[in-house]
């Protein structure tokens, strides 16, 4: 959080106090002038806070550098998008049933299963075998 955003928060809190005071009493012209000045101050601080944001305007990575390939996009988000386009996840139809992975672990060991199916799939399968007594009896 920067000094500008801290000041902006203070200005908005001050405006909130004016609002509470207006609910309890009639507003005088002087009070309305104070509220107007507070609104102007908050608007200026908001503009300053926006100017401090990264040129990419990324909400996930506010201080990220711009992507040199696109010029404007956040480098981190653009890299993640490119990664997603390059390597597509394997289709669900090709997925191996978890009970088959459990049997493979029982026959060949966990290390070989991880090399064959990947750590995530083996972990999911082992958790399922652990909680499914029929599968654990078969693999034991």
Image: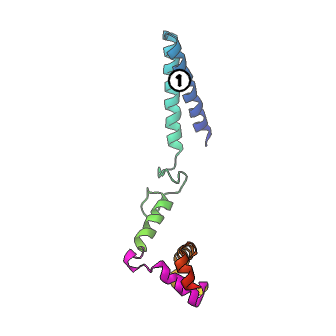
Where is residue 8 shown, x and y percent of the image? Answer: 56, 33
Residue at position x 56%, y 80% in the image = 136
Residue at position x 48%, y 78% in the image = 98
Where is residue 58 shown, x and y percent of the image? Answer: 48, 52
Residue 128 magenta-drawn?
no
Q: Quadrant of the N terminus?
A: top right
Q: Which residues are magenta?
A: 89-110
Vertical position of residue 80 compared to residue 93: above or below: above
Residue 94 magenta-drawn?
yes
Q: Is residue 113 visible?
A: no
Vertical position of residue 71 compared to residue 125: above or below: above
Task: Classify mark 1: helix, strand or loop.
Answer: helix
Comparing 97 with 5, the one in front is 97
Q: How many marks?
A: 1
Residue at position x 45%, y 79% in the image = 97
Comparing 112 with 24, the one in front is 112
Residue under numbered circle 1: 38
Residue 110 sits in quarter: bottom right
Vertical position of residue 112 compared to residue 64: above or below: below
Where is residue 134 shown, x and y percent of the image? Answer: 52, 78
């Amino acid at each position: 959080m920067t000094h500008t955003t801290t000041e902006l928060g203070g200005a908005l809190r001050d405006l909130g106090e004016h609002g509470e005071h207006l609910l309890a009493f009639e507003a005088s012209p002087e009070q309305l002038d104070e509220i107007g000045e507070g609104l102007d101050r908050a608007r200026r601080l908001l503009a300053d806070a926006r100017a401090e944001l990264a040129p990419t305007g990324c909400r996930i990575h506010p201080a990220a550098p711009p992507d040199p390939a696109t010029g404007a996009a956040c480098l981190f988000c653009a890299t993640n998008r490119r990664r997603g386009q390059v390597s597509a996840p394997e289709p669900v139809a090709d997925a191996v049933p978890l009970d088959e992975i459990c049997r493979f672990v029982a026959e060949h060991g966990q290390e070989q299963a991880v090399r064959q199916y990947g750590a995530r799939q083996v972990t999911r399968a082992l958790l399922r075998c652990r909680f499914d007594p029929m599968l654990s009896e078969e693999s034991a």
